[in-house]
């Protein structure tokens, strides 16, 4: 099977697929260059809410991978879409945001007023995304605001992501602490929910089997790709292990050792 002849669009997750920490996985730079030379449309999709498309493009450049800001879809972008979709039916005016500056900027674009200090305790909405400065005070503020009636959105439900030294906590792990304290479950916007895939479609990626989503997570990447109508390929370089397939209803169309397999016939 020739992947390059079979597919017109390639959508890649980042952590655990293209890179791990600050290192490229396999020969991912050469794979992406070959796809571009063959006039394939490429997009990148990530649940990591800490960085902007320009940040990610800069990181890929450092790894020897050319990309454009417009090729990235992030969970903060999906969060903003979720908020906009519900603004007319929800009484949201103010928001407390525990997250990166990038996440805060995306949420502010929806027209909500970000509040801080004591005003946060009466916010209409709480939004949480993992960021390096996440702390106990943010858990406390979010939990109290939710207990006072605020709605609750998380950028994704990912519990961890692969890094150079093992598994690092992701947004889902932080949400769990607030959910436990507040007694309320978060609504999430990232993969496998529809919001990121809606943005991809608007960017020109067709929701057909001629689109291949390449990811490392059954629960987010593969499940989301299936819902969107894409073909899916799971690479074994990230969070999924062989034992995870046992009894799992989520089945990728292809299982690959790494992204280098995209240049090899099956």
Image: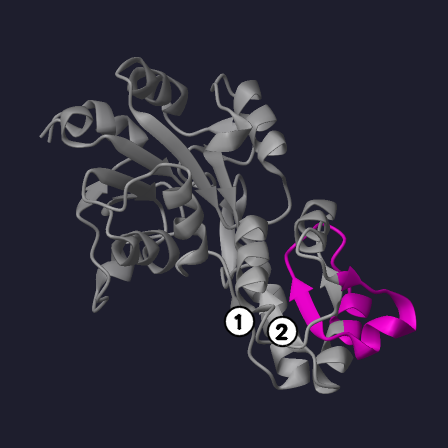
- Quarter where residue 38 is shown: top left
Which span is picked out in magenta? 113-141
Is residue 192 located in the magenta-colored stretch of the structure?
A: no
Give the class, few, some or many, for how many residues have Cα within 10 Å of label 1's Cα (few <14, many ≥20).
Answer: some
In what quadrant of the picture does the C terminus appear? top left
Name the colour scheme.
Answer: one colour
Q: Are marks 2 and 1 in contact (CB under 8 Å)?
A: yes
Residue at the (69%, 79%) spot, across then down: 150
Residue at the extreme front of the image, as rendered: 88
Q: Position of residue 50 (x, y in %)?
A: 64, 46
Residue 84, compared with residue 31, is above or below; it is below
Residue reaching furthest right?
A: 118
Q: Residue furthest top?
A: 37
Q: Give the quadrant of the N terminus.
A: top left
Query: Residue 180: x, y in percent?
Result: 62, 81
Q: Return the residue at label 1.
A: 187
Give the structural element (helix, strand or loop) at label 1.
strand
Residue 197, image x, y percentages: 39, 50
**Is any atom of residue 73 visible in this view?**
yes
Q: What residue lies at 25% left-to-right and 39% top-to-bottom? A: 211
Between 161 and 94, the residue placed more toward the observer is: 94
Residue 120 is inside the magenta segment: yes
Identify the disc placed on residue 164: none
Where residue 173 sits in the image (x, y, percent)? Answer: 58, 65
């Amino acid at each position: 099977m020739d992947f390059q002849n079979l597919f017109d669009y390639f959508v890649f997750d980042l952590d655990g697929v293209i890179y791990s920490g600050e290192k490229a996985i396999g020969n991912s730079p050469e794979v992406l260059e070959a796809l571009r030379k063959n006039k394939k449309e490429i997009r990148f999709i990530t649940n990591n809410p800490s960085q902007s498309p320009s940040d990610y493009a800069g990181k890929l450049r450092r790894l020897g991978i050319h990309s454009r800001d417009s090729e990235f879809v992030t969970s903060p972008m999906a969060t903003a879409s979720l908020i906009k979709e519900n603004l007319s039916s929800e009484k949201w005016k103010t928001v407390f945001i525990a997250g990166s500056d990038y996440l805060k900027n995306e949420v502010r674009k929806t027209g909500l007023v970000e509040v801080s200090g004591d005003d946060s305790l009466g916010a209409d909405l709480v939004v949480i995304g993992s960021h390096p400065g996440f702390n106990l005070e943010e858990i406390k503020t979010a939990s109290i605001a939710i207990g006072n009636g605020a709605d609750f959105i998380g950028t994704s439900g990912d519990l961890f992501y692969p890094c150079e030294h093992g598994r690092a906590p992701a947004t889902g792990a932080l949400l769990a602490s607030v959910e436990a304290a507040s007694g309320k479950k978060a609504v999430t916007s990232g993969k496998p929910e529809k919001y990121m895939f809606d943005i991809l479609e608007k960017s020109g990626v067709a929701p057909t089997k001629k689109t291949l989503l390449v990811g490392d997570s059954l629960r987010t990447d593969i499940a989301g790709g299936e819902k969107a109508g894409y073909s899916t390929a799971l690479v074994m370089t990230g969070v999924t292990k062989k034992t995870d397939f046992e009894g799992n209803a989520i089945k990728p169309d292809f299982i690959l050792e790494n992204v280098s397999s995209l240049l090899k016939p099956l």
